[in-house]
Image: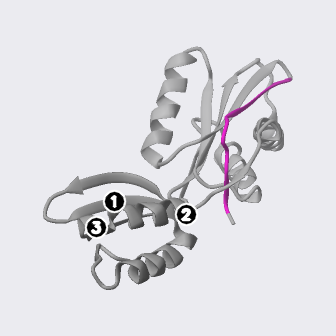
Amino acid sequence: MPFTLPQPGHAELDIKKSRFIACVEAVPSRAAALQRVAELKAAHPGAAHVCWAMLAGGHSAANDDGEPSGTAGRPMLDVLRHQQLEGVLATVVRYYGGVKLGAGGLVRAYTDAVAQALSHCAREEQVAMLTLGCSLPYALEGTARRLLQKHDATLLAVQHAANVTLQFSLPAQAADALQHDLNEACHGQLVWQDRP
């Protein structure tokens, strides 16, 4: 089961005069991750490198940003994978202190920076959500709303026309039970839209 981060985590390391500023935070997509990296580069114009790794939307990516290949982004990505995280971006801003760390030293520095940032974070289980829609007669709207509440569904939209159309979201694992209960309560008068 993948996990995500409800709050960002931060850490700062000083290694042989170089400063490593790490952040781990939730992101919904690669585009959001790239936007965040661009913001960090703008906020730290004097930094030598802004390295990053992300796991989001079933995709992974890592970038060494000028560090020797495989010494920053990939080790950071490995930390995220080891923690079974999804929808998470790890960034490390490095201010170069004039002392070269070597490939092994860089791998350790970037790995430790992300690991320390994660050590300050709570993790929460990522719950897959599903959005469903249905239409039904006005007389059954109250029944449907009570069943949505019982199954912890969130009502997203209601449209009143010839029938009532409801759009709602709920945890994917609860969808079958809710659909069954709605079908039973509505006695064949409910029509599903885009039913999975």
Labels 2 and 1: the sequence-earlier one: 2
Q: Secondary structure at mark 2?
A: helix
Q: Which residue is mark 3?
A: 139
* Spatial separation of the CA atoms under disc 1 and disc 3: 17 Å
Labels 3 and 2: the sequence-earlier one: 3
The mark lying in front, picked from 1 and 3, is 3
| 87 or 192: nearer the viewer | 192
Predominant SS of the magenta segment: strand
Q: Which mark is residue 37?
A: none
| 16 or 120: nearer the viewer | 120
Residue segment shown in magenta = 2-15
Residue 123 place in picture, x, y as percent: 74, 48
Looking at the rendered structure, the kind of residue marked 3 is Ala
**Hey, which residue is sitting farthest top in the picture?**
46
Q: Which quarter of the rendered picture does the N terminus lie within?
A: bottom right
Q: Residue at x 80, y 42 (%)?
A: 115
Q: Which residue is mark 2?
A: 150
Q: Secondary structure at mark 3?
A: helix
Find residue 2 and report its image quarter.
bottom right
Looking at the rendered structure, the kind of residue marked 2 is Lys
Q: How many marks on residues?
A: 3
Q: Which residue is mark 1?
A: 167
Q: Residue at x 38, y 61 (%)?
A: 142
